[in-house]
């Protein structure tokens, strides 16, 4: 399903790393009521998968960006993080992941309004992508 390619792209992007987004601050499907980081962080929420005429369709991925209120209340920082998340996601087309799946295409489906998360005490926004993937073929492994 290409989870590995997405995780790798977001955690190794040099610009996102400068914005403190690293393997320590990206959380696939975090569901605890406790905030996972005291730095800016991302939570990846894989949602439904559509079907298109007996073929697998894209899977919806919500990338939630959070910044603890103690650090900042500037939604511009979230906008910057999500801008570079989008660039990293769009560069993923035809990239194989370590989980045996290759990202086929990525479609940007928009961004949310500004939110305040009272459970985590963070400001937050999300970006939504349609991610289509296929099982990696031997010819795609480099």
Image (cartoon, rainbow, N blue to C red):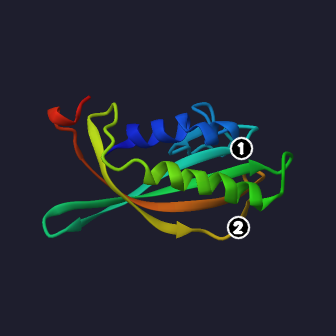
Q: CA distance from mark 1 to mark 2?
A: 15 Å
Tell me where residue 49 sits by quadrant.
bottom left
Residue at 46% across / 35% down in the picture?
8
Q: Residue furthest right?
A: 70
42 in relation to 98, above or below: below
Q: Secondary structure at mark 2?
A: loop
Q: Residues within 10 Å of mark 1 (few under 14, many from 20)?
A: many
User: Which quarter of the figure is the N terminus placed in?
Assistant: top left
Mark 1 or mark 2: name the one nearer the start of the chain.
Answer: 1
Residue at 55% across / 38% down in the picture?
13
Q: Secondary structure at mark 1?
A: loop
Residue bearing mark 2 = 114
Residue bearing mark 1 = 40
Residue 139 at x, y percent in the picture = 16, 34
Q: Residues within 10 Å of mark 2 (few under 14, many from 20)?
A: few
Residue 41 at x, y percent in the picture = 66, 43
Using the image as rendered, state which of residue 16 and residue 75 is in the foreground. 16
User: Which quarter of the figure is the C terminus placed in?
Assistant: top left
Residue 17 at x, y percent in the picture = 64, 36
């Amino acid at each position: 399903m290409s989870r590995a390619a997405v995780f790798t792209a977001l955690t190794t992007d040099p610009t996102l790393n400068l914005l403190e987004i690293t393997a320590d601050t990206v959380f696939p499907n975090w569901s605890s009521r406790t905030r996972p980081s005291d730095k800016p962080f991302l939570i990846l929420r894989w949602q439904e998968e559509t079907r298109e005429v007996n073929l697998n369709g894209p899977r919806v991925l919500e990338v939630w960006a959070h910044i603890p209120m103690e650090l900042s209340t500037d939604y511009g920082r979230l906008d910057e993080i999500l801008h570079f998340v989008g660039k990293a996601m769009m560069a993923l087309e035809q990239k194989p992941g370590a989980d045996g799946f290759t990202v086929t295409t990525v479609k940007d489906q928009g961004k949310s309004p500004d939110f305040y998360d009272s459970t985590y005490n963070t400001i937050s926004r999300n970006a939504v992508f349609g991610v289509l993937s296929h099982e990696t073929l031997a010819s795609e492994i480099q």
